[in-house]
Image: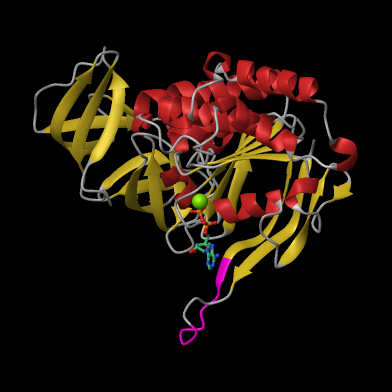
Amino acid sequence: MKVVLQNLTKIFPSRNKKANEEVIAVNDFTFEIPDGKLIGLLGPSGCGKSTTLYMISGLQKPTGGRIFFGDDDVTELSPENRGIGLVFQNYALYPHMTVKQNILFPLQNLKGADKMDKDVMLERAYQAAKLVQIDELMDRKPSELSGGQQQRVAIARALVKMPKVLLLDEPLSNLDARLRLQTREEIRRIQKETGITTIFVTHDQEEAMSISDMIVVMKLGVLQQIGKPQEVYDDPANLFVAKFLGTPPINVFAGEVKGGKLYLGEDAVLDVPGVDDRKVTVGIRPEGFVPAENGAMVCNLSNVEVMGRDVSVVSTHPASLNPQIRSIVDADNKIADAATVRFALKPHKVFLFDAETEERIRF
Ligand code: ADP
Ligand code: MG
């Protein structure tokens, strides 16, 4: 099921009457989520991810704009009538019910024409449980399950009604690191197997990048960029997006363009044809540095961390806006134990931004 957001906006009234500062949690979102894809809604805490998800689910009413599922305008529909499945960060299982009863619950509540026979409900519950691989645990209570198993039950409960759209709000946040990795792969597998259009909310860029067909990067209620994870990483629209994606994060410098060359301090480090003379903010990905004897960029070497396949070179530079520069280079490079290290730069790993607006300047 395709989901379309049209000028979707949510304004919360001020919590403090005196301050009278309303919050624009979601500011004029217009985008389309293609049928059968997994979309990651990504941004720092407070940027409006949950609010967007709750409006799509019907739990919150938009201040403005419309929501379509396929060609149907669902903006005024109640959550029960939208055909959605919801999973939250805290699993919210009924503690006094067994796993089976928890999964059956949404089916038992169906009314009218949707009412189901007991056998059909049971079969559906077992199908959903199999999909998330908890069909062996059907008679346990939630307290007898691990966090990861509980979250699988919550996913099975969301899937049992065969939703048209699956909405997941930071579903992995309460799991430990290993389970988080494993469960996110599970979610991806289930999504592919079922083909259910899925919207996955997270503040974790690596998580979003690794499982999404498309990511939507948000900041303070404003949409920053939409695209395939690799495309957004390789071609960020602004400094915020460039900084938000990637580990280790992008290195940021204050630079200046003069006569078609990019200067970091005294060093002309790269040709940037077609860019007018101006001050710029420069982002260089860690993998954009190539150790080279005559490299144009001269950094003060702090230390070298060997990580097997790669080497992480930590250095400083007067034009750097971060305390340290972190570059990742192939372990075949011999980094001499000296006071300085010189780098050549890979042009497609260097991004220029307007020093004021932080919008991308292309070259
Ligand atoms: P996220 O899920 O990205 O962390 P939210 O969607 O929860 O962000 O919140 C977006 C903004 O809206 C935040 O500034 C938050 O404080 C505000 N907000 C969320 N819910 C309410 C509410 N019920 N009343 C007032 N402000 C809210
Ligand atoms: Mg949230």
Residue shown at the point (70%, 37%) measured from the top left = 106
Front one among 258 and 194: 194
| Residue 356 part of the magenta segment | no
Front one among 256 and 132: 132
Residue 229 x %, y % = 56, 33
Q: Residue furthest bottom?
A: 18
Residue 319 x %, y % = 26, 50
Q: How is the image coloured?
A: secondary structure
Main SS class of the magenta portion in the image: loop
Instruction: From the viewer's perspective, tell me whether residue 258 is left or right of residue 189.
Output: left
Instruction: From the viewer's perspective, tell me whether residue 135 is left or right of residue 207.
Output: right
Among the 4 quarters of the image, the one containing residue 180: top left
| Region rendered in magenta | 17-24
Residue 325 x %, y % = 25, 39
Residue shown at the point (49%, 24%) measured from the top left = 183
Instruction: From the viewer's perspective, tell me whether residue 291 is left or right of residue 31.
Output: left
Among the 4 quarters of the image, the one containing residue 60: bottom right
Residue shown at the point (74%, 60%) measured from the top left = 7
**Is 263 drawn above or below residue 25 in the view shown?**
above
Q: Residue furthest left?
A: 338
Query: In the rendered view of the protein, which quadrant contains the N terminus?
Result: top right
Q: How many marks?
A: 0
| Residue 130 visible to the viewer | yes
Residue 176 x %, y % = 35, 30
Front one among 25 and 89: 89
Residue shown at the point (53%, 38%) measured from the top left = 93
| Residue 180 visible to the viewer | no
Instruction: From the viewer's perspective, tell me whether residue 121 is left or right of residue 255.
Output: right
